Amino acid sequence: MDTTEHDRSRPIQDWPLSVRLLLNIGHAIDHMYLLVFAAAVAVIAIDFGFTRWEDLMPFGVGAFVLFGLGALPAGRLGDLWGRRKMMLVFFYGMSGSMLLAAMAQSAWQLAAALTIMGAFASIYHPVGIPMLVQRSARPGMAIGVNGLAGNLGVAVAALVTGFLVKWFDWRSAFVVPAVIALVCGILFTRWCPHEDSAPSKGTIKAKVQLPPKLLVRSLLVLTMASVSANMLFNFTTNGNGQLMAERFKGLIEDPAMLGLLLALVYAIGALAQVVVGRLLDRVAVKPLFLSIVMLQMPLLLLASVSQGWLLYAALIGCMVFIFGAIPFVDVVIVRYVDDRMRSRVAGFRFAVSLGVSALAVWILGPFVKSAGFDSLFMFMALISLCTFCVVLMLPGERTSTVQG
């Protein structure tokens, strides 16, 4: 029986360019909207009567908890109901929840709106990424470009929020993204073809066929590695803005300029995902993954003790290798898991990893308030070491059967 990745009876036909573009924009939206609160937290704190931004930061944790836990039902619905339908729910839901956040009159109202937004944001990763690679001949490259789009969304969050807060107010930083998501939803409705059947009824096989025990082991390793990787992602993307404000004091204090510098850090870091994605279509996963994780540690330690422009250089290096580690899990899922169940597998992995890593948002403010950013970055270096040890347990591809 033929077990190639795609049916040989027909050539691969990728999604139309307009659909691929909107799927990548969806990734940018997902990450940007989750970080608008973190980018504007200092101004919102003043408006709501808080004396320190650290005291308001825990009110955003609900978004990240639902961002993780919601991935499990989202992945199941993506496979069994349809990925196109779920992406429409994503775009329109993100728009409505951001408008609710803009109308909040207290910290608890804002927390509720952000939590609802996190539930809709949970749809993208287990649904949008499997949908994007479903028809792709080069999934590594597709995931790399998609990762670039997602992290450009991180960069845009810092940049656009900084300018909107400076020129208007913090509420505009939620209203403008709401309008963008609404427009994307309308365009996706018009341009994305209807699915003939739910993905669970499809016949697209994984390229690498692992024995059941090794497949389970691989998915457990990936889930553990994903927890630590998302901890680093959440600590840095939610804390870097305040870190730069603290350590650039006396050099640059304009919020818009600091936002521009931080956006540049994320834009440079995001390019690493394209490079890694391209490499993953050509080389084995495990040695490349180990190399990237190992390089995170010295850069995080350097950032912990740096000030000013040396800190800036260290942050660029940190984000290059933190962002560069992101494509691995998605590429392994595409390589090892049949398409008919990829959304459910991805949903389980995201539910566990993002649910646990949401703790990073909860403890960020109190941790920095009590121990400072230097201790935070040392702690992140320890997390990288744990990730390295976990990835050592990932089976090599020589122990599997590669379907050609």
Image (cartoon, grey):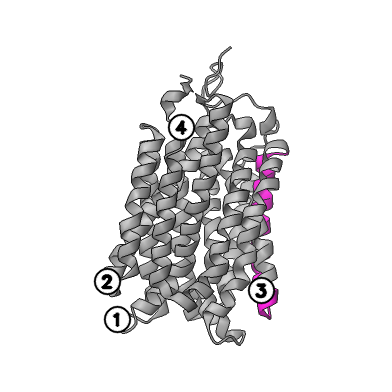
* Range shown magenta: 81-110
Would residue 110 be found to the left or right of residue 41 on screen? right
Q: Distance between the residues labelled 2 and 3?
A: 35 Å
Q: Residue placed farthest to the right in the image?
A: 81
Asked if residue 200 is positioned above or below residue 343 in the image, the reply reads above
Q: Distance between the residues labelled 4 and 1?
A: 48 Å
Residues marked 2 and 3 touching at CB (< 8 Å) = no
Badge 1 marks a residue whose secondary structure is: loop
Q: Name the residue under label 4.
A: 395
Question: Viewer-nearest of labels 4 and 1?
Answer: 4
Q: Mark 3 points at which residue?
A: 110
* Residue 359 % position (x, y): 57, 62
Residue 251's disc number = 1
Q: How far apart are marks 2 and 4 (CA)?
A: 41 Å
Name which residue lies at 61% across and 49% down.
352
Task: Inspect the image, locate mark 2, and give the three-letter code of the amino acid beneath it.
Answer: Trp
